[in-house]
Amino acid sequence: MEKIQEGMVIPRHVALILDGNGRWAKKRGLPRTMGHKEGCVTVEKTVEIAARMGIEYLTVYGFSTENWKRSAEEVGALMQLFRYYMVRLLKIASANNVRVRMIGDRSRFEKDIIEGINRLESETKENTGLTFVIAVNYGGRDEITRAAKKLAADCAAGGMQADEVTEEVVASYLDTAGMPDPDLLIRTSGEIRLSNYLLWQLAYTEIYVTDCLWPDFNKEELEKAILAYNKRDRRFGGAR
Ligand code: IPE
Ligand code: IPE
Ligand code: MG
């Protein structure tokens, strides 16, 4: 396999749609929950790998606004895993100088989960290495809708005039305010769709889809994606 070499560009911001936990479990005759459990281990490992590679931002889609439609059993199991991995993540973040940030509407979670998220963010906020962003109860449309509501309220309160609303202003109302847009989007498990992920932010992101199921994702898979990224001819709508 071709290797990452000196001179190659490490994308500053990698966004990930981790998909295929269910299929991974099914292939092994296991319950879906086991796929999610294994998927959490892969998230932990990926955070460490990305931090060592010098990626500045890693944004992972963990639970979408649509995922509440899954069975109560699966949603319940995901919440339990989330509780457990938040504690582990605190250790991993501290050991790897990682700053954790959550995007999405956390208000829908139970109180202890909200407290866990707040704690993870506040206890890692001084870390200067990788920023690990977890998208939970996240949906691009929901994010834009919440931003629009807040913006409309600020305009109504006299804080801003409608003609002062620029792209920069809109971006500053999104959950990702202050973050650069993703350079590379990786989706595992072969589906070629965005599933309501970072709709505003992915405007000019390079997209890489692999058939690898999320629990099987590893350093080699990440390197393959970065190599493919280095072969892309990035354009932002301009001529060459
Ligand atoms: C991704 O794996 C994890 C979540 C969406 C929480 P899936 O659960 O979507 O796995 P598949 O797509 O059914 O294989
Ligand atoms: C996307 O995966 C959401 C997350 C990874 C959290 P889904 O499995 O929910 O998306 P669809 O249903 O394949 O579009
Ligand atoms: Mg899926």
Image (cartoon, helix red, strand yellow):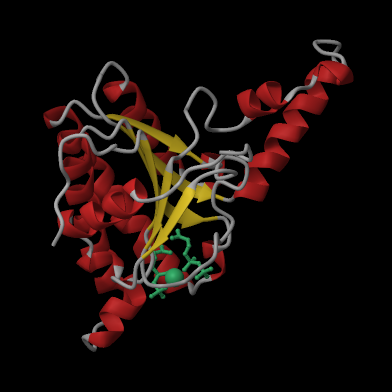
Residue 159 visible somewhere in the drawing:
yes
Residue 156 visible somewhere in the drawing:
no
Q: Residue at x 21, y 68 (%)?
A: 216
View extreme (front): residue: 240
Query: Where 185 sits versus 53, above or below?
Result: below
Give x and y (percent) for residue 88: 19, 43
Give x and y (percent) for residue 223: 21, 52
- Ligand 1 shows up in the quarter that is bottom left
In which image quadrant can residue 153 be found?
top right
In the displayed structure image, the side of residue 40 where residue 102 appears, left or right: right
Q: Residue at x 28, y 70 (%)?
A: 212
Query: Where 2 sits versus 153, above or below?
Result: below
In the displayed structure image, the side of residue 1 where residue 7 appears, left or right: right
Q: Quadrant of the C terminus?
A: top right
In which image quadrant can residue 54 be found?
top left
Q: Residue at x 41, y 70 (%)?
A: 74
Query: Where 62 sits versus 215, above or below?
Result: above
Give x and y (percent) for residue 57: 35, 34
Q: Nearer the viewer, residue 57 or 121?
A: 57
Q: How many marks?
A: 0
View extreme (bottom): residue: 29
In which image quadrant can residue 239 be found?
top right
Q: Residue at x 41, y 72 (%)?
A: 190
Q: Quadrant of the N terminus?
A: bottom left
